[in-house]
Every structure is written in structure tokens, then in C-alpha cells.
Amino acid sequence: MKKNSKGKVFVAMSGGVDSSVAAALLQKDGYEVTGVFMKVWQPDFLPCTWRTERLDAMRVAAHLNIPFFTWDFEKEYKEGVADYMIREYKAGRTPNPDVMCNKEVKFGAFFRRAMEVGADFVATGHYAQVARDKKNDTYRMLAGIDATKDQSYFLWTLGQAQLSKTFFPIGGFEKARVRALAKKFGIPVADKKDSQGLCFMGKLNVKDFLAHFIEEKEGSVVNEQGETIGVHRGAYFYTLGERHGFTIIKKTTEDAPYYVVAKDLVANTVTVAHNVAKKPLECASQALQASQVNFCRGTVIDTAHIYTAQVRYHGEFHKCTISTPINSTFSLHLEKPAVFDVGQSVVLYDGNECLGGGVIE
């Protein structure tokens, strides 16, 4: 370790603005920074972007004069993210690949290798925060300051082992401030557009992606009376509450959008309904069960306390109470009905603290 260094930090650098600024901030703060680009699996029918992204990350590392490595996590991504996603859709569930990307790749394979080669910490460009509770020496995960960019929802699988050795340097800034810092530091990608879409793969049509691995099977879209009013590409492609991706053939005088309220994998039908006057859809529920539960700082739950929960990224925060967790499961009772599907992540909050979450069953 270099003299006067606060420690060695391996930063996951994607070639984007956020991770680049994260590296610059840590360097400025006195840490010995190493940049790492993660090469992951990409299907051959999508544009190959990783070489361009890696080149951008290398340019930033050269500008900051820090060591730079490329680590291959193709196997981990293919098995832990892509295969999981395909398998869940085949089963009629709604997966969250971004959650699994963080669990299996960024805070799985990358975290482990960084520790193995001598890192004291890792860092990413996530909009989230870690706070140490000195009283009992635990680490809490907090939402990012910028509510429009907060990514704590995708990080509910992290535990004390990761949080105690992780930095989220930009979590305390608004996005506009991060852009300004990128220009201040002279970051070569300061004006680069934000990446969107699926973790590492970017923006894509999920149904088109899945069609390469799951045979499309056209079926009927039916209304609540059982009348066929349209067609879809396969019932397993759809999520409860979804309002896109199917075609309505039988038009009505009512121009309100249709939402998926039920799906039958055996009959290959999708049932849709109007969300009239924003009343809860028929498939909405106030109760849910979750499995594969993780609490970021251990089970700190008061069954009488009112928490909030999200069942989708940037979705509504629902007031709720929680049962005592048993064998990595818990039950939630929501204050008002919400639409959710099996396989989705439900993430629990107490104020701005992300307590953890689970997979809806």
C-alpha cells in the first residue's frame, strides 16, 4: 500500500460517467484506486458494445493515472443473470435480472476477486449510500440522495460482509452534480449519455430478447367477460399490471388502456381490463409472501411498526406491516391494494434506509 493511502479500492468501471466520477472522488479522498472493467456474456444477436465501453473505461483510468484491469465474468453473468431470467419467464414468473446482476456479479464474483487480490474495499457508481452505525458497529444501506436515480431497490441482497467493504461515492449527490464533477475532474466521458435498460446489456425489448430462447406461442387476449379482443406472443412473456406488448383487435368506444390482470400458461391466454378511474385492478392484493429474504443489517424488524415497501423499481411506496421472518420468508400486509407478480422483488424501507427484501411468491 502506498504511503498515506487510506486503503486499496477496486472500482467497477463501466465506461460511464457515474463510475468514473466514483473513481475520481475516491482518488481525491486519498485512496489507492484500481479500475476494473467487467466483461460479461452478451448474446450474438445484440450489438457488441463491450469493447467500446471498455475503451471508455480505459481512457478514464489513463486520465486518472490509475491501474486498470479487465476481468471476465462471462460464465457468472450467463448462469446467474441471463439463464435465471429465461428460466423464470418460462415458469410464468417475473424476474428481476438487475437484482441478480448485483448479487451474482458486482457484489458476488467481482467483490470476491477484489478481496482475493488484496483490495480493502470495492466501489461502484450506484446511487445509494452506506452509513456505519458506530453504536453497534453495523452498516446500513440508505437510498441515494437523488430520488430519481436511487438504486437501493436493486441492492437488497447485500449484507454486512459487502456493506462493510463497499463505497458508493456518488450516492450523496444529485445527478446534475455528478455531471458537474465529471467536467471539473476533466473526465473524458463527462458528456456521455446515461446507460439504460438491463444490467450490462443496455436497452432492449425483453420480449424480443426472450423470443430467442423461448418459443413464441400466439394466444388470445381476453376481457373480463371472456371475449377474445386481441392477440399476444405467449402468456409467459407478461407481467400482472403490464399495459404493453399485446395487440387489441376488437376496439371499443372507451379509449382507456388495458392492463394485464391474469394469465393462464396452460390455455395460453392473457386477461386484460381497464383501470377505470384509477381504481385498483382485480389482480391487486394487500397481502404478499416473500421468500429468499435478506436483511442488510440482520433481522431488525418490529411487527407493530409501519414500514414502506416497493414491488417494482421506482414504483409507489406502500405503507405496510411485516410478520416475523421464519426460514427466510416473511409476509407483508399493505395498507392498500397493489399489483405485483410472483418472482418480482419486494424491497422494504424504514424512512430512507433500505432494510432488505425478498422474492414475491
Image (cartoon, rainbow, N blue to C red):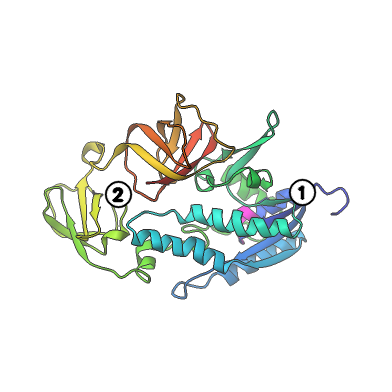
* On screen, residue 114 above or below 144: below
Q: Which residue is mark 2?
A: 240
- The answer to whether residue 97 is visible is yes
**Residue at 32% in and 42% down:** 339
Which portion, as a residue range, is magenta?
15-19
**Left or right for 70, reference 320:** right
Residue 42: x percent and y percent? 50, 70
Residue 4: x percent and y percent? 87, 48
Question: Hey, which residue is sitting farthest right in the picture?
Answer: 3
Circle 1 residues within 10 Å: few <14, some 14–19, many ≥20: few
Residue type at tag 2: Leu
Displayed quadrant of residue 70: bottom right
Displayed quadrant of residue 19: bottom right
Which image quarter is the N terminus in? bottom right
Q: How many marks?
A: 2
Question: Which SS class for mark 2?
Answer: loop
Contact, mark 2 vs mark 1 (Cβ under 8 Å): no
Asked if residue 295 is among those painted magenta in the image, a careful observer would answer no
Residue 200: x percent and y percent? 53, 62
Q: Which mark is residue 28?
A: 1
Circle 2 residues within 10 Å: few <14, some 14–19, many ≥20: many
**Residue at 43% in and 32% down:** 322
* On screen, residue 44 above or below 324: below
**Left or right for 336, reference 255:** right
**Residue at 76% in and 60% down:** 66
Residue 121: x percent and y percent? 71, 50
Mark before the other along the chain sequence, 2 or 1: 1
